[in-house]
Image (tube, rainbow, N blue to C red):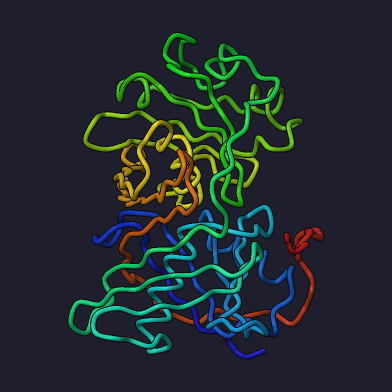
Amino acid sequence: MSPIAFTVYDVFTDRPFTGNQLAIIDAADDLDDQQMLAITREFGFSESAFLQRSEAPAVSRVRIFTTRGEIPFAGHPTIGVGIHLAAMGQVKRVGNDGMLVLDEGVGPVSVAVQWDGDAVVSAMLTAPRAPILGPAGPLRRSEIAELLGISARDVIDSPRVASCGSPVLVVPVRSLEVLGHCRLSIDRWVRFCEPIEDLRSLYVVADVGSEIRARMFAPHHGVMEDPATGSAAVALTGLLALGRADGTHAWTIRQGVEMGRPSELVVEADVEEGRVVTARVGGSARKTITGAIAIPESSVGRPPEVSTRRQS
């Protein structure tokens, strides 16, 4: 097989070497699931995106992999792919604006793109589903605090599961100091969380008034900590909008600061009758690396089989 082109972007940032790294592999139609997983592990980022021809009326089909397997939806790959395709001239431009639809495992995902002159400067995706809120399951607040190495009194409200296609447990803490002290215990994670179906990641948040600060821990997906998580950000709007008047509301979320990869995500929520009906997340991305990856013909060294069932 001939080498396949790839591009690396830093997403949810306007500065190279910050934000969340993303490998985009073009023309991936001939790659099988195991090859895509192996390539994702070779890059070692939280996610890689593989572009394929789409049978749906979309610009491209996007397969998203973590180092543990395929996932149906993720924010920073969607934003990065939208900006990448626009920069390659595959998005129709009207003035400084463009729109594309990506065919992802969760279904069609709309992405709005914005230019400044000749440069593509930002993108904003519309979550494929409105936020759904649920309880934290059988975990007590004290157990969640113990999992993060903080006191139960530092968790200021009841943690809740939120999802726009990828469930996350939102844990609100009382200060930036507490947020900075969080250290995930893998032993406790395996004991408390792995048996719970909807508990695949922890999104720890602190409201500091002018913005939301967040940290994401997702060991189930092979990510000890994530610099920017768009899928969690849109899910969080379901909680941020509680008690808000009908209309459109916006927040800025900063993530990755404690990792040395600061990221900025802008989220919007359209509220009707007291609930979020549409959620969006957007940000910038910067291209950092281009190249080609050699794909071995042999299956020797392939990782174990991974489920790639498409979610409806």
Rendered-image quadrant of the N terminus: bottom right
Looking at the image, is 159 positioned above or below residue 49? above
Residue visible at 36% across and 62% down in the picture: 10
Camera-side residue: 312 or 26? 312
Residue 28 spot, x, y in % from top left: 62, 81
Please name whichever residue, 146 or 110, is drawn nearer the observer in this view of the structure: 110
Identified at 70% across, 28% down, the residue is 190
The image quarter in which residue 8 lies: bottom left
Question: Residue at 26% of width from left, 38% of height from top?
Answer: 211
Within the image, what quadrant is residue 87 found in? bottom left
278, above or below 61, in the image: above
Q: Position of residue 163 (x, y in %)?
A: 58, 44
Horizontal relation, residue 167 to residue 197: left or right: left
Identified at 43% across, 33% down, the residue is 242
Q: Quadrant of the C terminus?
A: bottom right
What is the x, y in percent for residue 58? 56, 81
Q: Is residue 297 above or below residue 129?
A: below
Is residue 69 left or right of 12 when viewed as pictured? right
Extreme left residue here? 117
Q: Is residue 307 left or right of residue 260?
A: right
**x then y, percent, for residue 164:** 56, 50
